[in-house]
């Protein structure tokens, strides 16, 4: 793990990096294509022979075996189905050198982080989750631009793990143009439950209700932007959605209770014919929607010593992510690491 290259093109400093992507579906395939386009030496591996063949047609090396794909690599990105990631992590760790950085793109983080800790992999495994996707699946649906400017969660840990986090954060920012959101695995799973997982439940409920109504065809004929937007992720492959929801079950159910309570308030106001209450509830909801579309951010540059146990650095990074902030740059030198951070105005952590 080195971080000493430079150049006007932010991807140029990564030109000598050898990467591998394990699991080349929608997200993994998009990671693979982006790394290819950035000029990195990248190999992809997928358990499906047809997918490996398709990767080769895209001009990407796709060896027949996983061990061959990851051998001698500087970084390996794990992108298979969520339930397979623990075993894949252990297998890839055995097949790669100790200096190889490992990360994943799974939609939950607590379980896999715990597996890494139990097997002594925390020093080189950085849990990750790019917040992007589509209602299609497979390498054929992948695009090198899918993750452009995405919020990409990375989970830093104190000690040797911080070095891997710094290196990977720089790669994600420079190559993908992503906004790195540093969070603990537990904070990620809590926030993702409402930001990503519950919306899949709601989309499924709305689309499922439309499917069951006697007026289904009429509903679909009238469906406009609100219905299409509200049901988009219901088109996600069912097995993938089920894995995501079950992988974060307790937090999803907790957040769903909050959504249900707000929906009950809306229904109660509607039942009572209370226009004032309905208006107030939608004004409250509208504030969150407006904040999503446009929030003012403050910028801060912070430096931390390159050596040490990095506890203060990791604590600051996690506060930044929990406050809704992100990193747009990470430069690690021999003496210090410098972060460029952005957080909602008034929320930049000290």
Image: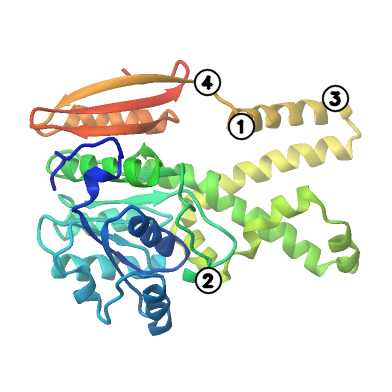
Visible residue check, residue 254: no
Tell us which disc is closer to us: 4 or 3: 4
Which residue is found at the position 16% from the left and 69% from the top? Answer: 71
Tell us which disc is closer to us: 1 or 2: 1
The quarter holding residue 334 reads top left
First of labels 1, 2 by sequence position: 2
Visible residue check, residue 334: yes
Can you identify the residue that label 4 sits on? 296
Q: CA distance from mark 2 to mark 4?
A: 38 Å
Can you identify the residue that label 2 sits on? 239
First of labels 4, 3 by sequence position: 3
Which residue is found at the position 29% from the left and 72% from the top? Answer: 61
Can you identify the residue that label 3 sits on? 276
Q: CA distance from mark 4 to mark 1?
A: 10 Å
Residue 293's mark? 1
Q: Secondary structure at mark 3?
A: helix
């Amino acid at each position: 793990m080195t971080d000493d290259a430079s150049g006007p093109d932010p991807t140029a400093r990564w030109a000598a990096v050898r990467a591998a992507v394990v699991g080349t579906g929608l997200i993994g395939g998009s990671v693979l294509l982006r790394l290819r386009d950035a000029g990195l030496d990248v190999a992809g591996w997928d358990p499906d022979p047809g997918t490996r063949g398709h990767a080769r047609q895209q001009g990407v090396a796709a060896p027949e075996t996983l061990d061959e794909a990851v051998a001698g690599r500087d970084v390996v990105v794990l992108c298979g189905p969520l339930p397979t990631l623990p075993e894949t992590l252990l297998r890839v760790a055995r097949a790669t050198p100790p200096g190889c950085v490992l990360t994943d793109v799974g939609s939950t983080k607590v379980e896999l982080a715990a597996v890494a800790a139990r097997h002594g992999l925390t020093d080189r495994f950085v849990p990750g989750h790019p917040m992007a996707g589509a209602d299609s699946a497979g390498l054929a649906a992948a695009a090198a631009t899918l993750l452009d400017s995405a919020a990409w969660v990375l989970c830093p840990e104190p000690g040797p793990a911080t070095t891997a986090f710094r290196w990977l954060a720089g790669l994600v920012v420079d190559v993908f143009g992503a906004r790195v959101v540093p969070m603990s695995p537990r904070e990620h799973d809590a926030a993702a439950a409402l930001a990503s997982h519950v919306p899949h439940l709601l989309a499924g409920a709305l689309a499922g209700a439309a499917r069951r109504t006697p007026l289904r065809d009429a509903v679909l004929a009238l469906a406009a932007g609100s219905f299409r937007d509200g049901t988009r992720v219901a088109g996600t492959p069912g097995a993938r959605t089920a894995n995501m929801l079950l992988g974060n079950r307790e937090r999803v159910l907790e957040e769903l209770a909050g959504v249900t309570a707000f929906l009950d308030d809306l229904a109660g106001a509607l039942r009572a014919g209370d226009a004032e209450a309905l208006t107030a509830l939608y004004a409250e909801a509208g504030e969150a929607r407006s904040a999503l579309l446009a929030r003012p951010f403050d910028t801060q540059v912070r430096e931390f010593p390159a050596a040490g146990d990095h506890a203060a650095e990791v604590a600051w990074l996690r506060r930044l992510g929990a406050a809704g902030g992100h990193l747009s740059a990470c430069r690690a030198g021999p003496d210090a690491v410098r972060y460029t951070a952005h957080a909602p105005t008034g929320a930049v952590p000290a």
